[in-house]
């Protein structure tokens, strides 16, 4: 059932954009501006695509943009679906399953995240080395079609070492510092409590956020290589004094947009 839906979405997208790109990008909160740099864009609103939900989060436009970025044909999601919006995880990861059906091979996930590691600062970029799924929810729960992916599958290198190396090379070329660490998924929509952040740190998290992990799991299940990059927009609750607001998150992602976009573009260029 979920595969039939993904196949119909994939078929529609392919009909609109012609050929499948090797790389798909998911542009997180406030980071969608990169899609505007895509040359000769073909725009496909989510509302047109069979089975696609419509994204409601602030800073998320709700459309696919296909075209050339850094000389490569790519497909970008300008806006993603979050569990906190009320979608079930099959809906959240439907695009990943559709991309896999289309023949996409690499998935570049970006997000805004709260910094847990005290050596981080707002405005830092963190390459996701690994994740912790604290929610206990998994998009692959339910019936499994073995022709699509294995029932039990390995997550040892969920964030592909080769793609991570490309991101490091891009950061070095641009002379920008790149943090690396573990992203922990909370469902939101409440930001975490200071006690949760202390627990997250003890458990090994460097950053926390409300996305990315279900998408990464579903993508790995379908054999995609995943790259994850966080823009640290704020320090997580209780790390320093002060409250967290979504205005602050959007303000910092707004401020960092040009640098973040340039870095994502350079990384796309560095991916073989
Ligand atoms: N917590 C969870 N998600 C986030 C945060 C945070 O502090 N900042 C940006 N996204």
Image (spheres, grey):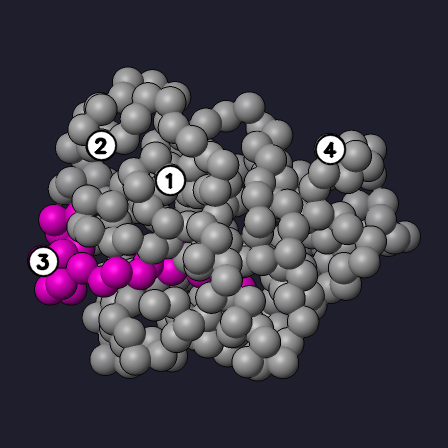
Question: Pointers 1 and 3 in contact (CB under 8 A)?
Answer: no
Which mark's residue is nearer the viewer, 4 or 3?
Answer: 4
Element under disc 1:
helix
- Residue 259, given in percent of the width and then of the height, sits at 58, 77
Structural distance between the alpha carbons of marks 1 and 3:
25 Å
**Residue sitting at x 50%, y 25%:** 137
Characterize the local packing of mark 2: few (<14), some (14-19) or many (20 or more) Cα atoms within 10 angstroms: some
> N-terminal of the two: label 4 or label 1?
4
- Residue 62, given in percent of the width and then of the height, sits at 36, 57
- Residue 138, given in percent of the width and then of the height, sits at 45, 27
The reply, left or right, for residue 4 in relation to residue 140 is: left
Q: Is residue 23 above or below residue 100?
A: below
Element under disc 2:
loop
Residue tagged 2: 148
Residue tagged 3: 15
Residue tagged 4: 203
Residue 181 vs residue 34, the one in the foreground: 181
The residue lying furthest to the top in this view is 143
> N-terminal of the two: label 1 or label 2?
2
Which mark's residue is nearer the viewer, 1 or 3?
Answer: 1
Question: Pointers 4 and 1 in contact (CB under 8 A)?
Answer: no
Structural distance between the alpha carbons of marks 1 and 2:
11 Å
Read off the magenta span.
Answer: 9-31
- Quarter the C terminus occupies: bottom left
> N-terminal of the two: label 2 or label 4?
2
């Amino acid at each position: 059932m979920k595969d039939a839906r993904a196949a119909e979405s994939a078929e529609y997208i392919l009909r609109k954009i012609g050929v499948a790109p090797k790389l798909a990008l998911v542009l997180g909160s406030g980071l969608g501006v990169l899609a505007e740099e895509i040359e000769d864009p073909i725009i496909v609103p989510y509302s047109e695509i069979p089975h696609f939900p419509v994204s409601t989060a602030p800073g998320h436009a709700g459309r696919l943009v296909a075209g050339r970025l850094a000389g490569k044909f790519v497909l970008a999601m300008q806006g993603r679906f979050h569990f906190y919006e009320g979608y079930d995880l099959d809906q959240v990861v439907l695009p990943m399953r559709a991309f896999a059906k289309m023949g996409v091979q690499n998935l570049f996930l970006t997000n805004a995240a709260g910094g847990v590691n005290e050596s981080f600062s707002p405005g830092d970029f963190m390459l996701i080395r690994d994740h912790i799924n604290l929610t206990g929810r998994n998009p692959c729960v339910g019936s499994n079609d073995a022709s699509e992916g294995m029932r039990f599958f390995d997550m040892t290198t969920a964030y592909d070492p080769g793609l991570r190396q490309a991101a490091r090379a891009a950061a070095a070329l641009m002379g920008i510092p790149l943090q690396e660490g573990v992203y922990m998924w909370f469902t939101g929509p409440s930001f975490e409590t200071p006690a949760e952040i202390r627990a997250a740190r003890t458990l090994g998290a460097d950053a926390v956020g409300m996305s990315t992990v279900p998408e990464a799991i579903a993508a790995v299940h379908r054999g995609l290589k995943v790259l994850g990059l966080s823009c640290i927009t704020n320090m997580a609750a209780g790390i320093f004094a002060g409250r967290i607001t979504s205005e602050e998150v959007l303000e910092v992602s707004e401020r960092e947009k040009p640098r973040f976009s340039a870095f994502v573009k350079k990384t796309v260029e560095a991916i073989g």
